[in-house]
Each structure stands twice: as C-alpha cells, then as structure tokens.
C-alpha cells in the first residue's frame, strides 16, 4: 500500500506540485450537491472550523501522508495537510484512481458569489473569525476539470475533519514510529439513519498509511508453536481465528494437529468480542499504548506521580510520596456524593459520579482498586451485605506488583464507601511492612510479609493471573486463603483465555466456581499487546469468583 501511495503522490507532485497549487479555486456551493441539506452544511463548516483551530499545520507537512479509513470504507484512503510551509492552508484527500478532494481555507472576498450567498443565508461559521477564512471544497479528477463532490464525498470529508481534530496532536513525530488510532465520530442528526438517531462511525488514522491496512492482522510476533520470532512481513496468521501467527507453514501444520484444531473456534469467538470489549467510544484519550512512554507523553503525564509505574524508564522510583500522585489527572480527594452503598455498573457511571472528564486516563490505574470495589460490592455477595450494614470487610490481595506503587489510588474505595459507613481493610502480601489509612479511615492498606500467616478475611482477590503456568503458585495461594477462612476468591485475567486457564487451576485446587467468567466492567480501557496471541487483552479484562 505504501508503494502505491508513493507513486500516487509522485504523480500529483509532477502534475500539481507539493503545495495547494492546483490553481485558484472559488469552491463548490455546497447547496448544489444533491442530498446536502443546509443542516449538514452547517455541521461540515463547524467541523472544518474545529480542525482549523487545532492547527495541525504546525507540525504536519505534505510529505506526512496520513492513512484514512471511515468505518470499513477506504474510498479516500490517504490525506495530506498542505500550507504549513507556505501557501493557503489546505487538506487533501486522495483516491487510488487519482481523484483529489481538497478543502482550502480562503478569505471571503475570493469565494464565488453563490458560496458567499450560501454563507450569509445559512449564517455559516468562519474557520478564522479574525481573517474571515471559510472552507472551500472541490474535487479534482486527474486531467479533468474540477467538479462538484458528491454527498458521500462530503460525508467522508466530515468524518475525517472530526477525527483529525481529535487525533493529530497524538502524532508527535510523523515519519518516526508508526501511529494508528481509532475514534468514534457521531454523525450529525441529518445524516444518521432514522432507526439510529445517535449513530457513530469509527474513523482510523494512521501514519504510515499501511499501518491501518488490516486491523485484524495479529499483533503477535512470536510463533504459536515454536515461540521463534515471526517477522510481520513473513508471519503466517491462522486463517480461521486470526489470533495466532506462525514463523513457517511446518509449524502451522504441526500446531494444528497437536493443539490448535481444538481451540481455533473458541479463539475466533473470543476475537469476535474485540469490538464489544474496546472502550474507544467511551473515552476521549487513546486506548492503545504500544509504547507506554509515548502514550504518557502525549497525555502530559510522563514521569509524573503514579504514572511512572506504567513505563519502564522510571519504574524504579516509588511515586507514593509525591504531592500530586495523579499528576492532576485523578478523581477529587473527597467523599463521593450520596447516601448508602454506591453500586456502580461501569466506568461511565463512575466518571459521572466523580465529575471526571472522559479525557482523564485515570481508569488505567483505577482499574485495580475499582475491580476490588466491584468484587466486594457485586461479585462476593457476603461482602456486599456486610458493607451495606456499615460493617468492615477484610480482603487479601494476592501477588501485588504495580499496586504497591499505587497506594494513593486505593483511597477511592474509601471515598465510594462514605455514604454507607462501611470500611475495607486490604492485606497486601509484600512491601516493607506497615499500614496506610486513607479516606477518613474508611480504607486501610496493610502490608503483610509473604512468609507470615494471613489474618482472617472475608474475601481474597488475585488480579491479572496467568493461569496454568502459575500452577504451583495457585496451590500455595489457595492453601493460604483457606487457612485464613476466606469464603470467596475473586480472580481476574488479562484475556478470556487467561481467565479460563485460571479457572481450571482454581478448580484443580478444590474450589468451585460461584460467578462465571465475564468481562470486568472496570477493566483498564488501554489494550494490552501480548506477544503470544492477538486475543482481546486488557489489564483486569475478565473476572470470575470461586468459593470453598
């Protein structure tokens, strides 16, 4: 795809140059486009104004080709931002057949009389009120006169303008590391189908364009049979499930005979849930972080507070003593409003309750404490009853890792319990000993040495368990949990496959399942990219409960 687009741009450079130089334009009077309602034209002008104000031309030049896909449509698969190095500011969308859809920001006096009349009659918003710049749209077929775009062309342009205004700031170094991100764009009411008045479309932007060629290609880069490296250009994905890859056809045949035949259908059903599990439509920050440092940097949180633990370059420094552990991106340090036990169904309800903007990535860290809160208020019924009566619930936290650096985040459990009078004590096996009380004493985190006997507790949680490969650990953990008189063991796994393996290990240890494997409503919205498979994977992605 990259080679084809390079040839396409060379052809356009030869014919038109690298700037907007397609010759002067007055733009199309969009009222002449069949099916383009005045309301849609108003929405299109607003989308153009929003992109203009975000100023992508500061960093993007014509050589930075952006791949574009609107839904499953790649009718206009590439885009350029022109004018950053001189000339009128413009956006070009290109088709493989050579068509070019351009939007140029022009002062009002140079527009055609029909367009000026349209601007006045519809009271259209200027993209730059000081210079009175308006978007002028036309379509240039190769070696043919300009013509009016179609309604479908304008729909595609609208979706691109909305997505580009949101996503181009994340493209920190065009021409450097590959970038691919998807955002849901709401169609304006006049374009949405009658049966779905709030319809949205997923728009994917990528750089280089080939990065978005096939989002079903497995992210795995190790052979599912021999674990050798499988380079992306030569890896052989399973044609049935697309969840695993192989380094050679021989490995694929052997793995099919020995193991994959039995699970391929199951893996396919897991892969089909990817869209359902993704949270890109809910949050306004990128939910894919192949490079955690770049992701944190794009959010302005790199090397700040508890966020240090999400990337490897500063994980050694403990953030719990920072004055602002959230880096101004967390919930308020105050009790949640309302009386009684707060029962939450997911992130949208929580963010609304705590007044957090959906652009806050706090869910990436809060997934751990809120999964525990979900465990004791929804999954482990005995704990829920005790908290509703204002009593104390003790929880054993098995195998903590990053959570030892995220102690300030656990105050959120206490804030949510403020209206019920309940209290949660969390025993973490690790750390240097001691205890921390937060949220007016409604939550206490106590660090217990791994060799010490666990106090009695009402529940135990084991987050992000791997499953079968932790068989010995499971046996020891279950014995310690039984000795502590724990009635419920709540387990999460990053993928459905990991959770299923953990469920088998729990059963083998003599416990029975009381809550089936299900998506965790408080899973991290940021996708994992495991090397062994391409199954949907999130921190605390799936949850189940077992009892003695």
Image (cartoon, helix red, strand yellow):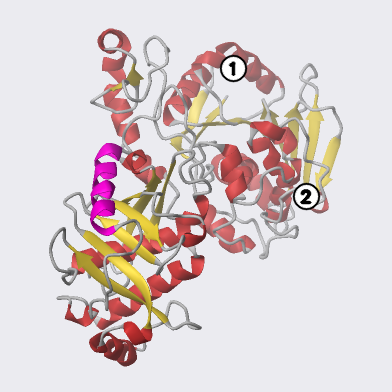
Q: Which residue, given by chain and number where applicable, does mark 1 sit on? A: 474
Residue 442's label in the rendered image is 2
Determine which quarter of the picture holds residue 188: bottom left
Q: Position of residue 359 (x, y in %)?
A: 55, 58
Q: Is residue 133 visible?
A: yes
Residue ID at (29%, 53%): 13
Residue 503's label in the rendered image is none
Span colored in magenta: 1-16
Q: Quadrant of the N terminus?
A: top left
Q: Is residue 11 magenta?
A: yes
Q: Quadrant of the C terminus?
A: top right
Residue nearer the viewer, 330 or 328 = 328
Residue nearer the viewer, 486 or 135 = 135
Closer to the N terminus: mark 1 or mark 2? 2
Compared with 1, 113 (above or below) is below
Determine which quarter of the picture holds residue 462: top right
Q: Is residue 30 left or right of residue 52?
A: left
């Amino acid at each position: 795809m990259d080679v084809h687009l390079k040839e396409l741009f060379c052809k356009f450079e030869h014919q038109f140059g690298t700037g907007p130089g397609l010759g002067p334009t007055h733009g199309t009077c969009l009222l002449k486009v069949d099916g383009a309602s005045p309301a849609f034209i108003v929405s299109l002008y607003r989308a153009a104004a929003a992109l203009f104000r975000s100023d992508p031309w500061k960093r993007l030049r014509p050589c930075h080709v952006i791949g574009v896909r609107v839904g499953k449509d790649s009718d206009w698969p590439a885009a350029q931002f022109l004018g950053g190095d001189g000339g009128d500011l413009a956006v070009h969308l290109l088709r493989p057949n050579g068509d070019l859809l351009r939007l140029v920001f022009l002062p009002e006096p140079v527009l055609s009389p029909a367009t000026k009349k349209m601007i006045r009659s519809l009271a259209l918003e200027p993209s730059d009120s000081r210079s009175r710049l308006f978007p002028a749209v036309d379509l240039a077929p190769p070696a043919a006169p300009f013509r009016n775009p179609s309604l479908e062309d304008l729909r595609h342009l609208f979706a691109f303008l909305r997505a580009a205004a949101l996503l181009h700031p994340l493209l920190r170094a065009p021409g450097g590391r590959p970038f691919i991100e998807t955002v849901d764009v709401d169609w304006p009411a006049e374009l949405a189908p009658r049966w779905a008045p709030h319809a949205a479309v997923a728009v994917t932007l990528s750089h280089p364009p080939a990065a978005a060629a096939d989002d079903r290609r497995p992210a795995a880069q190790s052979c599912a049979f021999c674990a050798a490296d499988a380079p992306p250009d030569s890896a052989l994905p399973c044609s049935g499930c697309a969840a695993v890859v192989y380094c050679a056809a021989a490995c694929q045949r052997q793995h099919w005979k020995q193991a994959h035949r039995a699970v391929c259908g199951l893996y396919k059903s897991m892969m089909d849930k990817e869209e359902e599990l993704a949270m890109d439509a809910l949050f306004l920050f990128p939910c894919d972080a192949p490079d955690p440092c770049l992701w944190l940097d794009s959010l302005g949180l790199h090397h700040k507070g508890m966020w240090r633990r999400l990337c490897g370059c500063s994980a050694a420094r403990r953030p719990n003593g920072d004055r602002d552990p959230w880096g101004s991106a967390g919930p308020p340090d105050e009790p949640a409003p309302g009386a009684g036990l707060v029962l939450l169904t997911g992130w949208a309800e929580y963010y609304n309750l705590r007044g957090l903007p959906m652009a806050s990535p706090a869910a990436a860290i809060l997934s751990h404490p809120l999964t525990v809160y979900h465990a004791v208020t929804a999954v482990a019924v005995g704990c829920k009853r005790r908290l509703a009566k204002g009593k104390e619930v003790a929880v054993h936290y098995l195998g903590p890792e990053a959570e030892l650096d995220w102690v300030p985040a656990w105050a959120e459990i206490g804030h949510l319990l403020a209206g019920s009078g309940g209290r949660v004590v969390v025993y973490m096996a690790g750390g240097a000993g001691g205890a921390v009380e937060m949220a007016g004493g409604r939550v206490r985190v106590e660090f217990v040495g791994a060799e010490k006997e666990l106090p009695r507790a009402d529940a135990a949680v084991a987050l992000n368990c791997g499953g079968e490969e932790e068989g010995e650990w499971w046996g020891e953990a279950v014995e310690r949990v039984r000795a502590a008189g724990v009635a419920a063991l709540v387990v999460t796994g990053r993928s459905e496959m990991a959770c299923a393996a953990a469920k088998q290990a729990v059963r083998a240890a003599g416990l029975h399942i009381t809550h089936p494997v299900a998506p965790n409503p408080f899973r991290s919205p940021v996708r994992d990219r495991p090397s062994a498979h391409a199954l949907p994977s999130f921190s605390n992605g799936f949850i189940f409960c077992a009892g003695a």
